[in-house]
Each structure stands twice: as structure tokens, then as C-alpha cells.
Image: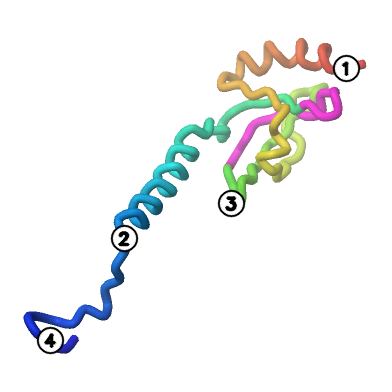
Amino acid sequence: MKAGSGGYERKDIMSYSLSQLRGAWGAGKAAAEKEMNRPPLVGKYFHSIEDGKVKWQGKVVAELPGDRYLVQLFSWLSGDSTNREIINLGDMANWRFFSEHSAWIEAGDKTFQEYQP
């Protein structure tokens, strides 16, 4: 930096107007609030409903980049684990989620009967 009249020349510092700073702060705050208000899905059990029928039962194992989740599926007949799938968050809109394993088990028969023809 070069010395100028009364101090240093400040070419490395960008200046922002107060409205620009408020806008950036507001955008960051809105994004943080959106993230805080998103219900955590990892660890939740679920029943998926597709085309008016129950499709899967399982547990959300991990959150992946890009609003995707890794889920562990379980057999309707034996309850044993079967496959793992990567699912987009938007595809989970009609799923029923459960925090507790016991609530998921209790709802399983009712959900299966409710959504079968």
C-alpha cells in the first residue's frame, strides 16, 4: 500500500452501502431460518405412500448433499432390512414419519390396510 495524504491508500477494501449489507444479512438470516425450521429426518422411521398405495417402510440413515437422503428399507413380511436407496427430499412429500420405533411399528398395520385397494 502506498502512503497518501493523511494515511494509506486502501485498494484492498471494498465498500458496500448500508442497503447492500442489510440485504446480504437478510438473505443469510432467511437461509439460516429455513434450515433451522426444517425438521430433521435422519433417524426417523417412515412409511412411503405413492399413487395412493403404500410402497416402502424404512428408516432415514443419512442426509446427503443436494436435499437427498439415504434410506434403509425393511421387508413388509419379515421386517428384515432389505435395500438402501437414495431419495430426493421432494419425493418424500407424502411420506409418514415417526420419531419412535414403537409408533412406527404400531402404525405399520394401519398404514398398510389404509392404502391397499
Coloration of the structure image: rainbow
The numbered disc on residue 17 is 2
State yes or no: residue 50 in magenta.
yes
Q: Earlier in the sequence, mark 3 or mark 2?
A: 2
Where disc 1 sits, the SS reads loop
Query: At x 76% / y 10%, what residue is drawn?
Result: 110
Question: Which mark is first along the chain, 4 or 3?
Answer: 4
Q: Quadrant of residue 21?
A: bottom left
Circle 1 sits on which residue? 116
Q: Residue at x 62, y 35 (%)?
A: 60
Tell me the residue that label 4 is attached to: 4
Disc 3 marks a residue whose amino acid type is Pro
Give the mark, 1 or 4, whose residue is nearer the N terminus.
4
Q: Are marks 3 and 2 in contact (CB under 8 Å)?
A: no
User: Label 1 to label 4, Cα distance in Å?
Assistant: 80 Å
Q: Quadrant of residue 46?
A: top right
